[in-house]
């Protein structure tokens, strides 16, 4: 007995067809949107990453 697993698109939560080319996304659009968001987060992390606080001598 094979259990049918429904995948939901991480972006829009729509049910993704099991043979979707864009798994786990429902469509190319959702896949690229998620990729862009991920890429932006990567950039943001790098931007906000500060070097360790330097100790100042008083
Ligand atoms: Zn989607």
Image (spheres, rainbow, N blue to C red):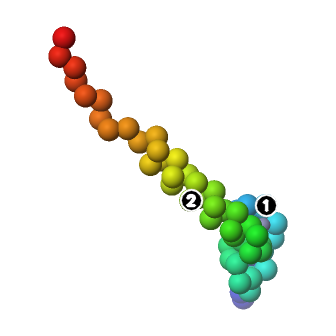
Is residue 19 placed above or below 49 in the rendered structure?
below
Q: Position of residue 49 (x, y in %)?
A: 41, 42
Element at badge 1? loop
In the picture of the structure, the residue carrying the numbered disc 1 is 12
Q: Indicate left or right for 15 with 31 as reference.
A: right
Q: Indicate left or right for 53 with 14 as reference.
A: left
Residue drawn at (68%, 68%), measured in percent from left and top? 32
Please give the count of numbered marks on the rendered protein. Answer: 2
Residue drawn at (74%, 75%), measured in percent from left and top? 28
Residue drawn at (79%, 80%), measured in percent from left and top? 17
Closer to us: 18 or 52: 52
Give the position of the C terminus as an image quadrant. top left
Element at badge 2? helix
Give the position of the N terminus as an image quadrant. bottom right
**For the residue carrying disc 2, how many other residues have a C-alpha within 10 Å: few (<14), some (14-19), or many (20+)?**
few
Q: Quadrant of residue 19?
A: bottom right
Q: Quadrant of residue 31?
A: bottom right
Q: Quadrant of residue 26?
A: bottom right
Is residue 2 placed above or below 15 in the rendered structure?
below
Q: Earlier in the sequence, mark 2 or mark 1?
A: 1
**For the residue carrying disc 1, how many other residues have a C-alpha within 10 Å: few (<14), some (14-19), or many (20+)?**
few
Q: Determine the quadrant in which ligand 1 lies.
A: bottom right
Tell me if the residue at label 1 has its CB under 8 Å from ligand 1: yes
In the picture of the structure, the residue carrying the numbered disc 2 is 39
Closer to us: 9 or 43: 43
Residue drawn at (71%, 84%), measured in percent from left and top? 21
Q: Position of residue 44 (x, y in %)?
A: 52, 47
Mark closer to the observer (2, 1):
2
Question: Can the viewer see residue 51?
Answer: yes
Cβ–Cβ under 8 Å for marks 2 and 1: no
């Amino acid at each position: 007995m094979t259990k049918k697993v429904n995948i939901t698109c991480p972006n829009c939560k729509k049910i993704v067809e099991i043979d979707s080319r864009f798994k786990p996304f429902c469509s190319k659009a959702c896949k690229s949107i998620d990729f862009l968001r991920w890429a932006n987060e990567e950039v943001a992390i790098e931007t906000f990453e500060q070097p360790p606080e330097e100790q100042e001598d008083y």
